[in-house]
Image: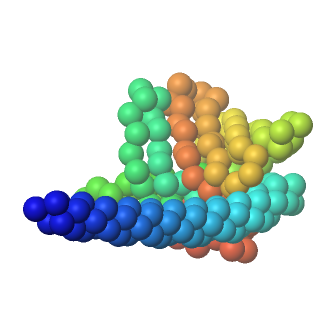
Amino acid sequence: MKKFIALLALVLVSASTMMYAQESNAAARRAERKAERDAERAKLRAEEEVQDMAAYQQAVQALKNKQFVLEANQVIFRNGMSAFVTSNTNFVLMNGNRATVQTAFNTPYPGSNGIGGVTVDGNSSDMKMNIDKKGNVNCSFSVQGIGISAQVFINMSSGNNTASVSISPNFNNNNLTLNGNIVPLDQSNIFKGRSW
């Protein structure tokens, strides 16, 4: 009987040692997989930051050259309601001394521009641009035309080309805010409707 108990104790000690070794190996494999995932995420984050910084620098240069388009993917109305929109038909464009503001919504009605919204062209003037110490960009200009007379304010955060444009008409209180990305005019993919 003593031999049987001794043999049983030996088997249990051996089994627990093997289970501990297996658990240690599993823990080491989990730690290795976690380290690989963390390294991959850090690499992707670094690549994304490089791309965002390149887009930011292109956007700043486009603003300085007055050759840019803010392709909006969200419109916020003066009452605070917002709508997600397509960026190729909702934009603010500046080409030298000319500016265009266009909105188009997914409605069954063609609107004045033929694509469900409004397109207004005008002459731009009084452009002022300021870059603070952190790299945030503030830009403002006036647009004067037949269908529009407004102040346009652009705010772009440092590190990427995401921006917000507030359009404040001079003759009414129908303020409009567009959120999207600023791209150089020659890289833009917009569709312009009939303007007035």
Figure quadrant of residue 144: top right
Q: Is residue 141 left or right of residue 73?
A: right
Q: What residue is shown at x 45% (from left), y 35% (from top)?
A: 77
> What is the tally of numbered marks visible in this picture?
0
Q: Is residue 26 left or right of residue 140?
A: left
Closest to the observer, 81 or 113: 81
Closest to the observer, 166 or 163: 163
Q: Is residue 67 left or right of residue 165?
A: right
Figure quadrant of residue 195: bottom right
Q: Position of residue 145 (x, y in %)?
A: 67, 47
Closest to the observer, 136 or 11: 11
Closest to the observer, 151 or 44: 44
- Examine the rendered structure and indicate whether residue 172 appears above or below residue 59: above
Q: How was this image coloured?
A: rainbow
- Examine the rendered structure and indicate whether residue 97 appears above or below residue 10: above
Quadrant location, the C terminus: bottom right
Q: Is residue 75 left or right of residue 11?
A: right
Evaluate whether residue 23 shows in this view.
no
Q: What residue is shown at x 71% (from left), y 44% (from top)?
A: 157
Evaluate whether residue 64 shows in this view.
yes
Q: What residue is shown at x 89% (from left), y 37% (from top)?
A: 133
- Examine the rendered structure and indicate whether residue 99 appears above or below residue 147: below
Figure quadrant of residue 134: top right
Quadrant location, the N terminus: bottom left
Task: Point out the residue furthest to the front here.
Answer: 2
Q: Position of residue 180 (x, y in %)?
A: 57, 52
Q: Position of residue 80 (x, y in %)?
A: 43, 29
Q: Position of residue 191 (x, y in %)?
A: 52, 70
